[in-house]
Image (tube, helix red, strand yellow):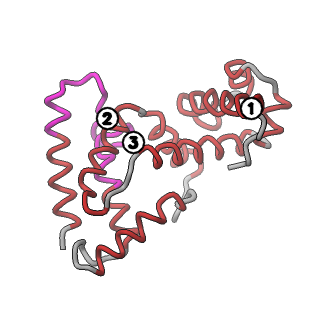
Amino acid sequence: MPELPSTPKGAATSRRILDAAAEEFSERGIAGARIERVIAAARTNKAQLYGYFGNKEGLFDAVIADAVSRGTKALPFDVDDIAGWAVEIYDQNLRHPDLVRLIAWIRLERRPTGMWFDHSDHDHKLTAIAKAQAAGRLRDCDPFDLLTVVLAMACAWSPASGVYAATSDEPAADHDRRRALLRDCVRSAVTP
């Protein structure tokens, strides 16, 4: 992600641009997004947007990096409660379905292979998993693969699901049932 401006006014403008662009990209994807709508919603101009983010692709990349970083920082990771962390991701997807929609647009429009965005926010998780595996507390496998399986399970009912997308307006009992199943399944998957 480009370095955001250091002045309070510049930082506020770039934040408005990121927020407006996140909504635009989430709703319409990369191809369907329009810079004119972003600058109108952000109350700025093309020169500032391009000055901060380079171009539409750079803006999309910055939106993804910002959303992933904010989401990662919002959910503390406890290697001894990976199942609880997975449930927190389920809840975060209910509260903020736009992040999952943004990631779905990456899949649709860019067709990535391999590791397709910066996973440095996960480095501490991978280190913690490897240490727990060495101590015999977690299944012995590639730490990244284990984390990937847990993330996939946590997103099973997200807007990226191929089967069912849960929403926050569903009955609490449905969410409680899914959380319990998710917790049990993750525990089974990570337990040696």
Residue 160's label in the rendered image is 3
Please tell me whether mark 2 or mark 1 is closer to you in this view. Answer: 1
At label 3, counting other C-alpha atoms closer than 10 Å, the crowd grade (few under 14, some 14-19, many 20 or more) is many
Quarter the C terminus occupies:
bottom left
Q: CA distance from mark 1 to mark 3?
A: 36 Å
Rendered image quadrant of residue 188: bottom left
Amino acid at the residue labelled 1: Pro
Extreme-bottom residue of the structure: 134
Q: Which residue has dot 1 on it?
A: 8
Residue 165's label in the rendered image is 2
Q: Earlier in the sequence, mark 2 or mark 1?
A: 1
Residue 18 horizontal side relative to residue 173, left or right: right
Q: CA distance from mark 2 to mark 3?
A: 7 Å
Q: Earlier in the sequence, mark 1 or mark 3?
A: 1
Question: Foreground residue, 161 or 134?
Answer: 134
Extreme-right residue of the structure: 47
Q: CA distance from mark 2 to mark 1?
A: 39 Å
- The boundaries of the magenta stretch are 151-177
Q: What residue sits 63% from the left and 38% below the top?
A: 30
Q: What residue sits 31% from the left and 44% below the top?
A: 88
Element type at mark 1 = helix
